[in-house]
Image (spheres, rainbow, N blue to C red):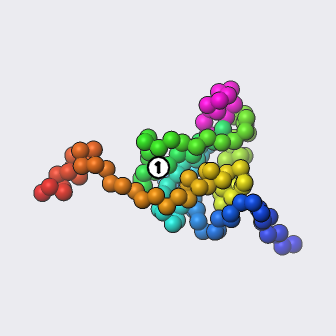
Amino acid sequence: MTPSPPAELPDSPALPAPAVELVASRQPEGHGFHFKVRTSGRVYRLDAARDPRQPRFWCFRICRCASSGVVDATERPWYGGDRMTREDLPPAVEAIRTALPDWLALPEHDDLRAWVMEERSVEALPRQLAPAMARRVRIE
C-alpha cells in the first residue's frame, strides 16, 4: 500500500519541503528541538512552556536563536498550542518534529510562518557590545 500524498492547504502558502530542517542535538532536549531555515540560516527552538494567558495549561514556545543554538533574548518568542496538559506534550512535540513543514504550513500558523521565513538580515553587534576578545582581535 502506498502512502497518500499530504493534503493541500488552499488558503495557506505551501513551504518547499527543504525550507526547514531539524538541527541534530548533542544532548537530550526534553520537550523540544531546534530547527533551521535553510534560506536564511536562522535557527529556532521549539519547546514547551506554560501558557502565558492560562498558566495551568501548557503551550509551545518558539524562540529565535543565535547560530550556536542559544536563545536570542532580544527577540520576543511566539506562543501557540491550545490548552495542553503535561501529558499531551511528548506526543505533540513528536508529531511536530516528524512533520515540521506541514505543521508550519497550517493556516493558523500564518503569522508564525511569516516570522520564521522572513528574510531580514542579521546585523552585527555594535562594537561596544561585542565580546572583549572579538574587540581585541579586530583592533590588533
Q: Residue furthest front?
A: 11
User: Is 51 part of what is drawn in magenta?
Assistant: yes
Q: Is residue 140 left or right of residue 110?
A: left
Give the labeled residue for mark 1: 65
Q: Is residue 67 left or right of residue 52?
A: left
SS at mark 1?
strand
User: In the image, what residue type sits under mark 1?
Assistant: Cys
Q: Position of residue 18 (x, y in %)?
A: 60, 68
Q: Is residue 121 visible?
A: yes
Question: Which residue is drawn at the image coordinates 42% and 59% (left, top)?
Answer: 121
Q: Is residue 29 visible?
A: no
Compared with 28, 102 (above or below) is below
Question: Which residue is drawn at the image coordinates 59% and 65% (left, top)?
Answer: 19
User: Which region is colored magenta?
Assistant: 48-58
Q: Position of residue 117 (x, y in %)?
A: 56, 59
Closest to the observer, 61 or 10:
10
Question: Which residue is drawn at the image coordinates 44% and 45% (left, top)?
Answer: 72
Question: Which residue is drawn at the image coordinates 73% and 39% (left, top)?
Answer: 82
Compared with 78, 124 (above or below) is below
Residue 49 falls in which quadrant of the image? Answer: top right
Compared with 27, 42 (above or below) is below
Q: Is residue 135 left or right of residue 49?
A: left
Q: Residue furthest bottom?
A: 2
Q: Position of residue 130 (x, y in %)?
A: 27, 47
